Amino acid sequence: MTDSLPHRPLSMLRAVVVAALIGVAFFLPQLFGGSSVAYSTLTTIALFAVMCYGVDVVLSYLGEVSLGHTVFWAIGGYVAALMSVHLGVNGWVTALATIGLSVAAATFLGLVTLRTREFVFSLVTYAAAVVTHEIAFNWDAVGGSDGTVGIPALKLPLGFFTYVGGTQEELWPIAFALLLLTLFFVARFRRSRLGTTALMVHMNPALATSLGVDQRRVRLAVFVISAPITALAGWLYAYQRAYVGPDMFEAYFLVMMLTAVVLVGRRILLGPLLGTAVLIIQQNLLSLGGDWNKVILGFVLAAVLIFWPAGLMGLVDHMRQRWLRKTRTNGRENKRSYMEEVQ
Amino acid sequence: MNLSQQIVNGLVLGSGYACIALGWTILLGVARLVNFAHGQLYMLSAFVTWYAMTRAGAPYWAAIVIAIVVLSLLGALMQLAMTRLVIEQNLTSLMIVTLGLGYVIQGGGALIFGGNPQTLSSVLARTKVDAGALWFTWQDVLVLAMTFVLYAAVWLFVNRTRFGSVIRAVAEDPRLAQLFGINAKLVYLGVFVFECAAVALAAALVAPRAPILTSMGFNEVIMTFVVVVLGGIGSIGGALLAGLGLGMFIAFFGAFVAPAYTTAAAFGMLLLLLVVRPVGLATK
């Protein structure tokens, strides 16, 4: 575990490889034929992956199951929708408001749940989602049960010109940039003092206490920084769909976030991204219909934790070790037969 | 909208909450396990009862028995799949696994029973009790009576029998209990099967009040969580009191403040309580 989190400076070679991979990833839609489906699927993957990273930070480094991240997801969507429809402001303003509001909401929720652990924490965060859903559903000022339609195209003024994200093709670079930003942020977090302390609080609370770590502060800080990640994904989702409604609170998003994180394995930087990719590809391109997709998604989530708690990466590790052991014993057997022949 | 009618409504709602919360309270309080599929199990029980009555023509009481048997079998399967996590007391994984299984049940329910709302009609739900201006049905009386009987029976079983102390010993320390020759896996299996049977019975009793939908799941039983936490996680008497109290609160809030925001109000109260008293009301 510790060897994945060292203060290793990025060597030149690594930097070049990473830059090359990012470059290739950016042209993935063209590599897959450049069709509108390719663009929309990859944009959705990037977007949903960002959504999942918010939960990943809490689940992987605090070991807590937040069922309230749909609140932050919805905050992003609603802020983008309401501000751009009613106030006509550009994407930077709605993004800043999204960050501000989600941090405020997470601080409130974090303070309320400060003394709760495990299932009570999960329940209270879920309760927060139910309450917010009820308010969003009944309050006509935020669209009520109909939601808000006709969200204008995402406009990002960049000084000399304004980038407009109207189509899936135009939204892809934004989703891609947001994903990169998130990955960079999470990678930094993993190496940061907060990230390592959070992991210590999760893995060895007694040690953390003996070192004078204020556990509540660490938990609160991690929860608060996780919120804007998921919220910004919701922000972009609103522009992609041009509609925002109470369906952003649906259990689907919650189950999706958790499944994407545990599928590949917790505490793996690219885990949630790969998990999201697998799940979205199944749902968009190999869909068996909504109800079957639910069965599959739920089953994957349960089966991974029951059979391979360390996720697919854990399975790969397991296989590799078995293979190594096998080749080693094979080698020994060969040697023995050789010895027997000699004798 | 008189006061006594609201008290009756509160009792009706509250006994329903307490009834649905019973399985959860036992699972959590006695065995320290969580089950986030509770809502979907409730949905499934309601639909199994409905199916047995409308499609197979079974009488109400037989449909209840069928639902209990089906849910007990399903519960046994779920618990067998989760045995390793349960013995390890890996609550985080258990929460996520049950959430996932709940999603499977929801999708599977929609595949089997279709997406249309149905009504689970029992004769009792259609017969109104003649008590002056007050409005309630014989089904409500049945739910209230059954809730008290069930809570009393469970309390006696857990606190006054040898089996009850065995279960509590396993909850306290499964490994130590095994040293004393107790089969912890079997005890967990029994408790989980009981949870599923209890939710089946509760669903068959409470579900006739409102139309049932395969998507109702989690939100339909969300109040049970408030009941369990308010009652002081796992306290049997606490859950009964919390259920009835919550029913009263919801009835009065819905009648005099805002019917659309009752859930929000209940959870607002819960959040407030958690700040003041994170362990719940019943514990000292």
Image: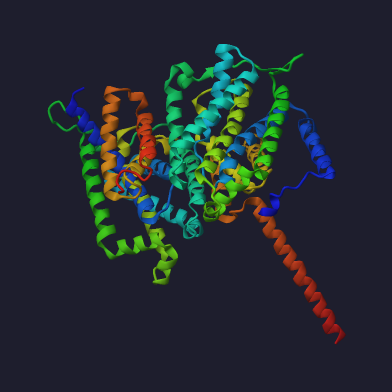
Q: What residue is shown at x 38% (from left), y 34% (from top)?
A: B267
Q: Is residue B169 left or right of residue A334?
A: left
Give x and y (percent) for residue A122.
47, 42
Q: Nearer the viewer, residue B92 or A242?
A: B92
Q: Is residue B171 left or right of residue A8?
A: left
Coloring basis for residues? rainbow
Q: Is residue A259 left or right of residue B242?
A: right
Q: How many marks?
A: 0
Q: Quadrant of the N terminus of chain A?
A: bottom right
User: Residue A36 occupies which quadrant of the picture?
Assistant: top right
Q: Residue furthest left?
A: B132
Note whether A16 is above or below B93 in the view shown: above
Q: Residue furthest right?
A: A342
Q: Nearer the viewer, residue A118 or B73?
A: A118
Residue A209 appears in the rendering: yes
Q: Quadrant of the C terminus of chain A?
A: bottom right
Give x and y (percent) for residue B36.
44, 45
Residue A126 appears in the rendering: no
Q: Is residue B75 left or right of residue A80?
A: left
Note whether A78 is above or below A324 in the view shown: above
Note whether B127 is above or below B32 in the view shown: above
Q: Residue furthest front?
A: A212
Give x and y (percent) for residue B272.
37, 35
Q: Nearer the viewer, residue B233 or A11?
A: A11
Give x and y (percent) for residue B106.
47, 40
